[in-house]
Amino acid sequence: MKDSKAKYYVWIAAIAFFCEVLIATKFAGFNHVRGSLSDFLVVIFLYFLVKVFWDGPSCPLALSILGFACAVEISQHFHLADALGLRRGGLASILLGNTFSLLDILMYLAGTVVAYLFDTFFIRKPAPRSA
């Protein structure tokens, strides 16, 4: 961790991960909450996890995270987990998923935008201009 911002990234990633675990365990029966909120949070988790180790520009990172999430979602449309022979219920199959949804892509977009804006305006806020 190179700078003071990294501690914020660690905390946000940890909170997002904790929420993901809570959703997967305590809210497993609430499909809408588990599906949509989890998709929203996973990109936030990934964004801030990467920021812990990489202090590069935020916009390319946000676009990369969104692209990765969308690629995983599109792979679900083509049943990649089944094509790879991943055991249903196994960790790899669960992480890759098997149900395509446009709502998931919208949730990835919303989560990515929130992560980027939060990072840009609250953590990396621009220094005030002197007159």
Image (cartoon, rainbow, N blue to C red):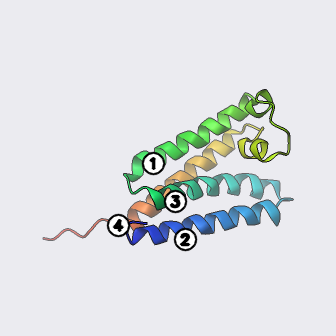
Q: Which residue is mark 3?
A: 48
Residue located at (85% from left, 45% from top): 89
Q: CA distance from mark 3 to mark 4?
A: 16 Å
The quarter of the image holding the C terminus is bottom left
Disc 1 crowd rating (10 Å Cα; few below 14, some 14-19, many 20+) is many
N-terminal of the pair, mark 1 or mark 2, is: 2
N-terminal of the pair, mark 1 or mark 4, is: 1
Q: CA distance from mark 3 to mark 2?
A: 9 Å
79 is higher (above) or lower (below) than 9:
above
Q: CA distance from mark 4 to mark 2?
A: 18 Å
Amino acid type assigned to the residue bearing label 1 in the image: Leu
Q: Which residue is mark 1?
A: 61
Residue 59 visible in the shown view:
yes
Residue located at (69% from left, 57% from top): 37
- Asked whether, in this view, residue 111 is left or right of residue 100, the answer is left
Disc 4 crowd rating (10 Å Cα; few below 14, some 14-19, many 20+) is few
Please tell me in which quadrant of the rendered image residue 78 appears: top right
Q: Which residue is mark 2?
A: 11
Amino acid type assigned to the residue bearing label 2 in the image: Trp
Q: Which residue is mark 4?
A: 125
- Residue nearest the observer in this picture, 112 or 52: 52
Residue 43, image x, y percentages: 58, 52
Residue located at (63% from left, 49% from top): 107
5 is higher (above) or lower (below) than 120:
below
Helix, strand or loop at mark 1: helix
Q: Do labels 4 and 2 touch, CB within 8 Å?
A: no
Nearer the camera: disc 4 or disc 2:
2
